[in-house]
Image: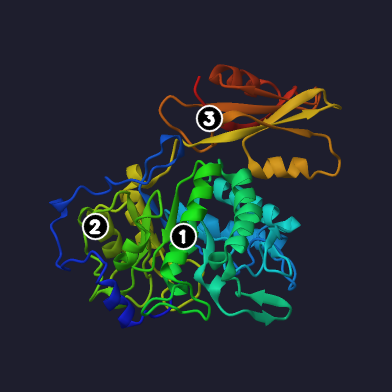
Amino acid sequence: MKRSWCMPFLTALLLVALSGPSVLRDASATTPGMARVPLPRDGSWYLLGVNYPWRAYGHDFGQTAWGHDGVSAGASRAQVDTNFSDLQSHGVHVVRWFLLGDCRAAPEFDANGYATGFDEYVYQDLDAALAIAQKHNIYLVLVLLDYKVAKKAETVNGVQLGGRSRVISDPATRQAFLDNAVRPLLQRYGGDPVILAWEVMNEPEGAMAIPGGAWVEEPVNPAVMQSFVTSVVNCIHAYSSQPVTVGSVSRCSLPYWTACRLDFYQYHYYDYMESTCPLDYRYADLGLDKPCIVGEFPTANTSHTITQYLDTIWRNGYAGALAWSFGAGDQYSDFAGVSAEFRAWSEAHADAVDIRGVPFPVYRFWSDSLHGHFYTISRAERDDLINDPAHVWTYEGVAYYAYAQDQQGAGLLPVYRFWSNVLGAHFYTISEAEKDKLLAYPAAWFWTYEGIAWHAHP
């Protein structure tokens, strides 16, 4: 999410930055994609994707005085599902999505400015978002906060925008945010395989009292921001298996974050940075202790094609590239205009970017009336049964882990699902011969084929 950077900021960063020449290098100068982000369950992929980055800034998750139009709302869910279907069809595997933004919808705060928790819609919205992402084989980098959280408070039709800088700067307010917002999120979603990573804040430099920064009315001291980032990182490490990063505004500002215990680094690039922090720069020359991705680069108002961006970032050894953006609607966003070219690049690098082999939970239900269990890997199906007013099925939790319906990997076989109206029960088999035998019976026979339930090792 962009605004023009003042040159004094970039100049000042050169005092602490790692900089270098902008000449084009031979492709053999580094081994592409070697520095990968450490992912749960031994995953190792190049993170190729796009910034969603929101359907409605700041209220995709939770309710405001404007009402509820978060992801779980009917029209919103349909729109996000359509968007993610489009992203999947164009080779997108990773989506960066802003979660709390400037805190206009979540979390809830008391009169003293302390976070008290989430309203009833936040988890419903996030569950819906995760179900949609899983359906389309897309993995999420969830951005907890945006720098606009530190803007001077403004009330618009009963909704406070920004005005939460004390979450960063005041120890008691920060702790309430950690205890009542961050930790509950992690306790619920800290092992979710669709969440690839957490991001503490988008472009925190904009909320810091530094030359060229301080885009907000309530900026904090750099040391205070670093302390805040580290405290959130520690919380994520304590309650989550997913890695954590920060969306640094520029490659030249990465030194601000090297002591914050991040699992991988991230920086953003726009053409106006070229003279001080050029695009063509090797990861190996940064001297970082962890991998690094380029988390934003423009798809509009730029002198580079999307292929040039992706080739340069890949060739220079970074761990991923996330284009800006699908739906921000700003001057740097036109993913639709480059999507065909993006898809071609994705398909050419499928072995590195097509995230496969990630096990998902299989959910188990019990029915007293049908005297049987039901298993599903589908979040949407799980949620439908949990919320079914007939209450035929009682949710019992995660039974085990398996692989999604469209994940065909080495050693994996499909598990087929059948339903019997006569018996009021499901039947599962990994046997191809048994499946074919049941399919050969007359249509009026016991078993109706429902398709592949998931993939598993025999």
The residue identified by callout 1 is 227
Residue 350 found in image quarter: top left
Residue 57 found in image quarter: bottom right
Residue 368 found in image quarter: top right
Residue 251 or 260: which is nearer the viewer? 260
Q: Position of residue 405 (x, y in %)?
A: 55, 36
Closer mark to the observer between disc 3 and disc 2: 2
Q: Position of residue 261 (x, y in %)?
A: 40, 50
Q: Earlier in the sequence, mark 1 or mark 3?
A: 1
The residue identified by callout 3 is 455
Residue 391 or 400: which is nearer the viewer? 400
* Side (left or right) of 71 relative to 8: right
In percent of the image, x 22 and y 64: which residue is there? 280
In percent of the image, x 62 and y 67: which residue is there? 103
Closer mark to the observer between disc 1 and disc 3: 1
Q: Position of residue 427 (x, y in %)?
A: 68, 23
Q: Position of residue 442 (x, y in %)?
A: 71, 23
- Between the C-alphas of marks 2 and 1, the distance is 23 Å
- Going by the numbered disc 1, the residue's amino acid type is Ser
Residue 41 or 144: which is nearer the viewer? 144
Please rate how many residues cluster around mark 1, counting C-alpha atoms within 10 Å: few if below 14, some from 14 to 19, many from 20.
some
Residue at the far front: name it. Answer: 171
The residue identified by callout 2 is 286
- Between the C-alphas of marks 1 and 3, the distance is 44 Å
* Side (left or right) of 417 relative to 120: left
Please rate how many residues cluster around mark 2, counting C-alpha atoms within 10 Å: few if below 14, some from 14 to 19, many from 20.
some
In percent of the image, x 14 and y 53: which residue is there? 29
Closer mark to the observer between disc 2 and disc 1: 1
